[in-house]
Image (cartoon, rainbow, N blue to C red):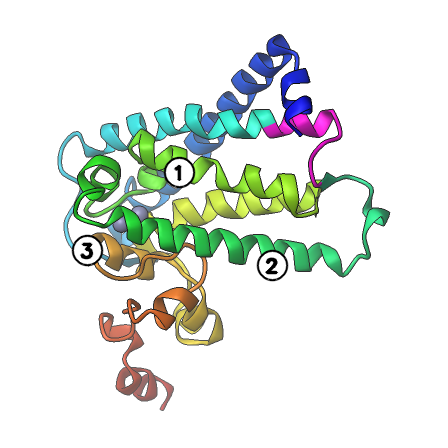
Amino acid sequence: MLDTLLNIPPGKLLITYVALTAIIAVRYFMISGLFYWLLWGRRQDKVHAIKLMEGTPRPGMVAQEIRWSLISSFIYAAPAAVVLEMWQLGDTAIYNDLDAYPLWYLPVSIGIYLFLHDTYFYWTHRLMHLKKLFPVMHRVHHLSRPPTPWAAFSFHPWESVLGAVFLPALALFIPIHVGGILFILTLMTLAAVFNHSGYEIFPKWWLRGLPGRHLITAAHHDLHHKHFDCNYALYFRFWDKLMGTDIMESEYDFLRPEKVAREAA
Ligand SMILES: [Zn+2]
Ligand SMILES: [Zn+2]
């Protein structure tokens, strides 16, 4: 593996790196920009989503979120470019021949990646909330109160480095189809934008039902930006529930059992 790393032509790596940075940044501008306009940029009576935290971002906050997110694009692209080049040289666990593994392995591998990513995110996130690490690594992300879709990648560079290395490292060891990787990257970007949108865009039946009880949406992550000491995870509520850091139903009127029962009657 180290041999492959040393065999990557530097010029080619640089081109891949620049291209990936551009793709990540453009994708961020398109998705965050669209949701910012849909939710924050139009007359509020036209927005059919649940506004979460009260208030609006303080002046200059959106510009700051964009600046940090752009710096994050440069950081996220670096390990991804290295792994992409190693893949070209045939020395990663990424495969593109669908017959290389049984078809059932495709969804299973995606599930394994998401679970491991969620676990990594939960524990590194809790680590960054330790008194000594918080001001150095994570304070930047918590300046967004309420967050907007532009806050999706608004991290201090140290936090971005921590976030950027995990998936490329997994791709060196756990076999996954290239389509699976693209699916996870798309899901990750959408989740980051949705969870910071400041509005809950999923319908109430989703939030009250099985998906909402186990999957993270904006309503869940918004509470992390509000209270700081709860709801640390990325995709699933599993780790928060297990560790006693999950809050949700007690915080929102539309999720209270008596309210749900009244509306159903
Ligand atoms: Zn956040
Ligand atoms: Zn946090």
Mark 3–mark 2 distance (CA, rounded to whole Å): 30 Å
Taking the spot 58% from the left edge, 52% from the top edge, the residue there is 113
Q: Which of the two discs, 3 and 2, labels the residue nearer the N terminus?
A: 2
Taking the spot 61% from the left edge, 46% from the top edge, the residue there is 183
* 49 falls in the magenta region: no
Q: Which mark is residue 226?
A: 3
Instruction: Out of 32 and 40, give the one closest to the viewer.
Output: 32
Where does the magenta region start and end?
Answer: 83-93
Task: Rate crowding at label 1 as few (under 14), some (14 to 19) or many (20 or more) other CA atoms within 10 Å.
Answer: some
Q: Which residue of the protein is positioned furthest toward the bottom in this rendering?
A: 265
Give left or right: position of 139 versus 168: left
Mark 1–mark 2 distance (CA, rounded to whole Å): 21 Å
Q: Which numbered disc, 3 or 1, marks the residue closer to the eye?
A: 1
Query: Looking at numbered disc 3 in the image, what kind of residue is underneath it?
Result: Lys
Mark 3–mark 1 distance (CA, rounded to whole Å): 23 Å
Q: Which of the two discs, 3 and 1, labels the residue nearer the N terminus?
A: 1
Q: Which residue is mark 1?
A: 162
Taking the spot 50% from the left edge, 21% from the top edge, the residue there is 22
Instruction: Please say if 85 is above or below 212.
Output: above
The answer to whether the residues at label 3 and label 1 have Cβ atoms under 8 Å apart is no
Q: Which of the two discs, 1 and 2, labels the residue nearer the N terminus?
A: 2
Residue 248 x %, y %? 29, 69
Q: Which mark is residue 111?
A: 2
Disc 2 on helix, strand or loop?
Answer: helix
Q: Which mark is residue 59?
A: none
Query: Looking at numbered disc 1 in the image, what kind of residue is underneath it?
Result: Leu
Residue 182 in view of the camera:
no
Give left or right: position of 240 versus 26: left
